[in-house]
Image (cartoon, helix red, strand yellow):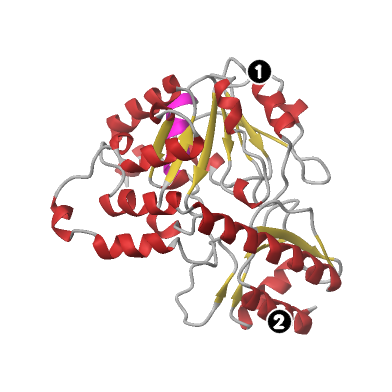
Amino acid sequence: MKWEENVRRVTPYTPGEQPQKAGIIKLNTNENPYGPAPGVAEAIRELDAEKLRLYPAFPEKTDLVKALAEHYQIGTDQIFIGVGSDDVLSMIFLTFFQSDRPVFFPDITYSFYDVWADVYRIPYETKALDADFRIRPEDYRQPNGGVIFPNPNAPTGELISLDAVEEIVKNNRDVVVIVDEAYIDFGGISALPLIEKYDNLLVVQTFSKSRSMAGMRIGYAMGQPPLIRYLNDVKYSVNSFTMNMPALALSVEAVRDEAYFTDCCNKIMKTRERAEEELAKRGFVFPKSSANFIFASHKAVPAREIFEKLKEHDIYVRWWNKARIDNYLRITIGTDEQMEALYRALDQIV
């Protein structure tokens, strides 16, 4: 068909399976196994449905931005809000990666990066992780059009130190550097303090993991005010009303309940430690994780075989048919009860 000559063609991002079958154990998309803060449920009951006929407030004028600014002790003009961190990162690609030089990111990383680069026709170059799946800061010292990497990395769970993050930022002062911290709350130290020192740094976080609100789609970037202004200019040129009213209201309660947030993160980290012990007993090897998942390979049984057989037990984990990682599984940390069911299934499989 003639019109197809003008279609922009890309290979889309492939998310983890979302089975609708009742009673499954879903350990494939890194969702939090615990519900959001109790105040979120209370806020749901208090929502005024009549107000849904109105457009929501601009995000930067909302209580959510004020709550985040207070929580992180930064200015309200240093926060950009979007529909999940995917929306935030997409706006970042569109806004800041406009050079003829390639954007740099790891070869094994969040697989949406190359999709956005293709959609927006941005040149990019991947930098190979070392043999232990670690980012090498020295690989990011060449001329480029921007740098983005997760810390901890996904799907490996590997964390680089704050000094290593700063090394990458200070060696790339002529471009914007993005640290994607979707999993930072499960054992890492945020790069947020560096935004006062470097005017080219954006730190991106999300409510989907540690704050148990993946279903509301809330993400945010933090940086110096000029970066935030540029992001808002692009956002308002695409869609002024990106955040819906319930999400803006409910997310405030998730930020305010620091005790609940800390308790949930601690529970997941404790379960992760036990999972590392149990998986090691069963012949798995894996890098040390600082995220809410473990990136594991079995010494004898192929990852794809384990992946398929776990589904027969109604347990879903993540597997990729990709070079270097096709014999690894990414296993989300669930509740203690869910993980016990996983161990029992693995005892039959491996």
Range of magenta residues = 86-96
Q: Tell me which secondary structure the magenta stretch mostly adopts.
A: helix
How far across and down, in percent of the image, does residue 168 sit?
69, 26
How far across and down, in percent of the image, does residue 120 sit?
44, 33
Indicate the quadrant where residue 295 lies: bottom right
Nearer-the-camera pick, 229 or 312: 229
Residue at the top extreme, as displayed: 174
Local SS, label 1: loop
Please tell me how many numbered marks the rendered image carries: 2
Could you tell me which residue is drawn at 38 percent across and 60 percent down?
Answer: 39
How far across and down, in percent of the image, does residue 109 sit?
64, 45
Mark 2 to mark 1 CA distance (whole Å): 49 Å
How far across and down, in percent of the image, does residue 65 sit?
37, 38
Q: Amino acid at mark 1?
A: Pro
Q: Which residue is mark 2?
A: 345
Give the side of residue 242 with respect to residue 273, left or right: left
For marks 2 and 1, give the one nearer the viewer.
2
Residue 251 seen in the figure: yes
Identify the mark nearer the N-term, 2 or 1: 1
Give the side of residue 58 with respect to residue 214, left or right: left
Q: Which residue is mark 1?
A: 143
Local SS, label 2: helix
